[in-house]
Image (cartoon, rainbow, N blue to C red):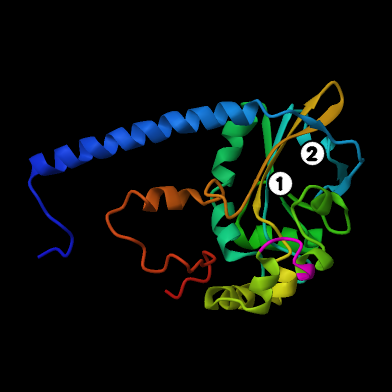
Amino acid sequence: MAEHKTGTREEWEAARAELAKLEAEQAERNNEIKEKRRELPWVPVEKEYELDTEDGKKTLAELFDGRSQLLAYNIMYGPDYTKGACPGCTMLGDEFSGSLVHLNHRDVTFLCFSRAPIDKLAAYKKRMGWEFPYVSTYDSDFPFDMGLAMTEEQALSGEIPGVKEMIDDPPEFLQEWSEQVGAELKDGLREGPGYIAFARENGTVYLTYQVMAPDPFVAPFHSFLLARTPKEPSDEMRAWRKDEYPD
């Protein structure tokens, strides 16, 4: 006998109809949020940044690669990480490559940022089989100016709510995460996972949108799929890199 509640097809259809109402309301709300997001004021990026790519240094404007929109995800991979990027960010990164052709044909260049040096990023990209451009913000003010990373002072001073508390008294899953990336929490937690978007018009680059974890918008697509399966994943808090699963 199944442990979950069972019923007739008619009972299922009635319950599914109730759920469909909630899903429709959520979809409508999501459309409202999308419009509000696009109504945000654009902020000119006045500082000139040069970032490291696999093809040498490029300005932020050059990263657009001739398109008018740039969307990036900041992967938690700091200079002090010795075992690779955050496993959760890595799981998300596994899903980006297939979207590149579709985004590019819609006037969007997509790439990922990380603060580790470019040689580390290139090696990790090869290990993971990623195809998206991977750009290093190492030795640049860019990640700090854009809120993609914290300085050591910010992390340890309590300026950012909750960070110092997690460093001083980390839960078990964070201790495990620290071991997975090979960095102390005081260094590892300085990186901020999230999306950041820019537009380029008439030679000016504008910051248009940003969202950082733990916002629910920063989640891998497989989480969207798992939310539609009948059973709750037993290892929800455990993130594995695809080449590190026990089997």
Task: Give the amino acid type for the residue marked by disc 1 in the picture.
Answer: Pro
Is residue 83 in view? no
Relative side of 84 to 231, left or right: right
Q: Sequence-wise, which precedes: disc 1 or disc 2?
A: 2
Segment colored magenta: 156-161
Which image quadrant is residue 246 in?
A: bottom left
> Is 59 left, or right, of 103 in this rendering?
right
The residue labelled by disc 2 is 63
Disc number placed over residue 133 in the picture, else none: 1
Q: At 7% across and 46% down in the image, what residue appears?
A: 8
Indicate the quadrant containing the C terminus: top left, top right, bottom left or bottom right.
bottom left
> Three-letter amino acid code at disc 2?
Leu
| Residue 160: quadrant of the picture | bottom right
| Point 9% across, 39% down: residue | 10
**Residue 77 position (above or below residue 20):** below
Q: Position of residue 149 (x, y in %)?
A: 76, 57
